[in-house]
Image (spheres, helix red, strand yellow):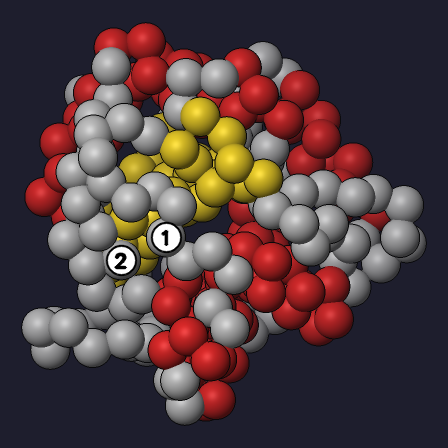
Amino acid sequence: MKYLVLLGLLFIGQIGHSQVHLKLAKLKYDGGGDWYANKTALPNLAKFCNANMGMNFDTDDEVVDVSSPDLFLYPYIYMTGHGNVVFSRSDAQNLRTYLEAGGFLHIDDNYGLDQFIRLEMKKVFPELDFVELPFNHPIYHQQFEFKDGLPKIHEHDGKPAQGFGLIYNGRLVCFYSYESDLGNGWEDQSIYNDPEVKRQQALKMGANIISYCFTQYQ
């Protein structure tokens, strides 16, 4: 269970030295929701982090099932989708053990995920509620500054973007980007044709999340 913490410390010590290759992973889940959405998002985020933050990610992302022991190989897990999510009891326990061990889950609502993921994360941490993170939270102030919090990348209902978190024993174990659609902004520009300024905002915020995921071990 201490493996993830040790891996995070190792990663911090090797940033910029081209000695560590880590992969970003997308979470596969049951329920019929499109967990596989945003196919080019993580490779593009990895490339951005490598180019702008001296990181050394493999630009081929991985897929990991929420029930798999392989979950523990990835310090950062990305979850997205538009629809239904169902965690079995064993899924929820595996995800909880991963997060307690030092793992980090980023849930990125791709529109329509909210009503499902809030219920399912209650299976993981029944004692915790999502709390909105204040704009002065460190996740918004890593290499890139977001003084107004989570950027709005893709419009759906005209609601403001909000960043929520689950905090376990004083540590942010899950960051939930709601009404923002960061993953759309990470995608190849040809897919959504968002303005470049929006794509850069999304990539910079993604890089901040990655940076925070590792630097919180310090």
Position of residue 156 measured from the top left corner of the image (x, y, whole percent) = 15, 73
Q: Residue at x 47, y 56 (%)?
A: 39
Q: Earlier in the sequence, mark 1 or mark 2?
A: 1
In this orientation, which residue lies closer to the viewer: 161 or 139? 161
**Label 1–label 2 contact, CB within 8 A:** yes
Mark 1 or 2: the one toward you: 1
Position of residue 62 measured from the top left corner of the image (x, y, whole percent) = 58, 39
Residue 16: assigned label: none
Residue 129 shown left or right of residue 94 in the figure: left
Residue 134 shown left or right of residue 116 in the figure: right
Figure quadrant of the C terminus: top right
124 relative to 175, above or below: above
117 relative to 152, above or below: above
Which amino acid, mark 1? Answer: Ala
Position of residue 176 measured from the top left corner of the image (x, y, whole percent) = 31, 50
Position of residue 142 measured from the top left corner of the image (x, y, whole percent) = 56, 65
Residue 110: assigned label: 2
Q: Secondary structure at mark 1?
A: loop
Q: Residue at x 44, y 26 (%)?
A: 65
- The residue pinned by badge 1 equals 37
Binning the other alpha carbons within 10 Å of mark 2 as few (below 14), some (14 to 19) or many (20 upward) gives many
Whether residue 125 is visible to the viewer of this picture, yes or no, is no
Q: CA distance from mark 1 to mark 2?
A: 8 Å
160 relative to 31, above or below: below
Residue 114 shown left or right of residue 204 in the figure: left
Which amino acid, mark 2? Answer: Asn
